[in-house]
C-alpha cells in the first residue's frame, strides 16, 4: 500500500472522525502527514494513533494567523506540499430565524473562510501535479431544514473547487471534493442538541439512506485517498459523492 509514498499532506480537523481516519490511511499509504486541531491533548492522542511520519500542529482552522503558521511550519519541516485536505468543519443546525450573526460568522469562518485562506497560503508551496481536496456535503443539493449556515458554507466550497480548477491548471494542480452523506462521526455530538435529539436525527437520516445506515469515517477516507492518488489523475473539478445513495433517490 504505497499510493502516496513521499507525498506531504496537510489535513485540518484531524483530532477525530474523517480527518483522523484519513490521516491514518494517508500514512499507511506512505505519506508524510501534517495534522491540525484546536485541542492540543486530543491532537497529541490522534498523532499517537497514526503509524508513520506525522507532524501535529495545534491550530484553529478559522484563524488566519494559525493558518499561516500551519503552512510555514509544514514547509520548514518538509519543504513543500503535495496534498491539501481542508477537512475541519462545524455543523450547528438551527432554523434561519434562530441563527444569530455570531453563529453564522463562526460557521462561515471555519467551514469556508478557513479553507479558502489555507489554500491561498499553500499555493506558492504546492508542488506541480498536487491536489486540493475539499470536504463538502450532499446537503447542498437537498434543502434539508435547519442547515442554512452550514450548507451555505459547504456550497461555497463546491464553487471554489471549480474556480481553483481553472486557476491552478498551469501547475497541473487538481481541485476536487468529497461529498459525504450522513457519517458516524463525533460531529453529531457537537450540534447543540440533546442526546435524544441527536439520536432521533440520526435515525431519521439513516432511514432515508438506501443502504439503511450511516457511513463510516473510513469509507470517506478511502475516497479521499483515491482522489489524492495518481489513480485519480484525470479527476478534476469534480465532487465525488459518498452517501449510500441518499442524494440519488
Image (cartoon, rainbow, N blue to C red):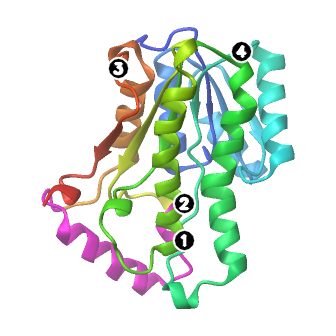
Q: How far separated are the C-alphas under marks 3 and 1?
A: 31 Å
The image position of residue 244, as x and y in percent, is 21, 52
- Which of the labelled discs sits on residue 153, or is there none? 2
In magenta segment, residue 186: no
- Tag 2, which secondary structure? helix
The image position of residue 33, as x and y in percent, is 62, 25
Residue depicted at 65% across the width and 35% down the height:
48
Find disc 4 in the rendering and name its residue. 80
| Magenta segment | 187-212
Evaluate if marks 3 and 2 touch, with contact meaning CB atoms under 8 Å apart: no
Find disc 1 in the rendering and name its residue. 149
Q: How far separated are the C-alphas under marks 2 and 1?
A: 6 Å
Q: How far separated are the C-alphas under marks 1 and 4?
A: 34 Å
Question: Quadrant of the rendered structure where residue 206 is?
Answer: bottom left
Find disc 3 in the rendering and name its residue. 232
**Mark 4 or 3, nearer chain start:** 4
Question: Quadrant of the rendered structure where residue 181 is?
Answer: bottom left
Is 34 on the left-hand or right-hand side of 158? right
The image position of residue 129, as x and y in percent, is 52, 12
Amino acid at each position: 500500500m504505497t499510493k502516496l509514498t513521499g507525498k506531504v499532506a496537510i489535513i485540518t480537523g484531524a483530532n477525530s472522525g474523517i480527518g483522523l481516519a484519513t490521516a491514518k490511511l494517508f500514512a499507511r499509504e506512505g505519506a508524510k502527514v501534517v495534522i491540525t486541531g484546536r485541542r492540543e491533548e486530543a491532537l497529541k492522542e490522534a498523532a499517537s494513533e497514526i503509524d508513520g511520519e506525522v507532524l501535529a500542529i495545534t491550530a484553529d482552522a478559522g484563524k488566519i494567523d494559525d493558518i499561516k503558521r500551519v503552512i510555514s511550519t509544514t514547509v520548514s519541516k518538509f519543504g513543500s506540499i503535495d496534498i491539501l485536505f481542508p477537512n475541519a468543519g462545524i455543523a450547528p443546525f438551527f432554523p434561519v430565524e434562530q441563527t444569530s450573526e455570531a453563529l453564522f460568522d463562526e460557521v462561515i469562518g471555519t467551514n469556508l473562510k478557513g479553507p479558502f485562506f489555507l489554500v491561498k497560503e499553500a499555493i506558492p508551496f504546492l508542488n506541480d501535479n498536487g491536489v486540493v481536496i475539499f470536504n463538502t456535503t450532499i446537503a447542498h443539493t437537498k434543502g434539508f431544514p435547519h442547515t442554512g449556515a452550514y450548507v451555505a458554507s459547504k456550497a461555497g466550497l463546491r464553487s471554489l473547487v471549480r474556480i481553483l480548477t481553472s486557476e491552478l491548471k498551469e501547475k497541473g494542480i487538481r481541485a476536487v471534493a468529497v461529498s459525504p452523506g450522513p457519517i458516524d462521526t463525533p460531529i453529531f455530538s457537537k450540534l447543540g442538541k440533546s442526546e435524544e435529539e441527536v439520536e432521533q436525527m440520526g435515525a431519521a437520516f439513516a432511514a432515508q439512506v438506501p443502504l439503511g445506515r450511516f457511513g463510516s469515517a473510513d469509507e470517506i477516507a478511502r475516497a479521499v485517498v483515491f482522489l489524492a492518488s495518481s489513480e485519480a489523475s484525470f479527476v478534476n473539478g469534480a465532487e465525488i459523492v459518498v452517501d449510500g445513495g441518499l442524494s440519488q433517490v
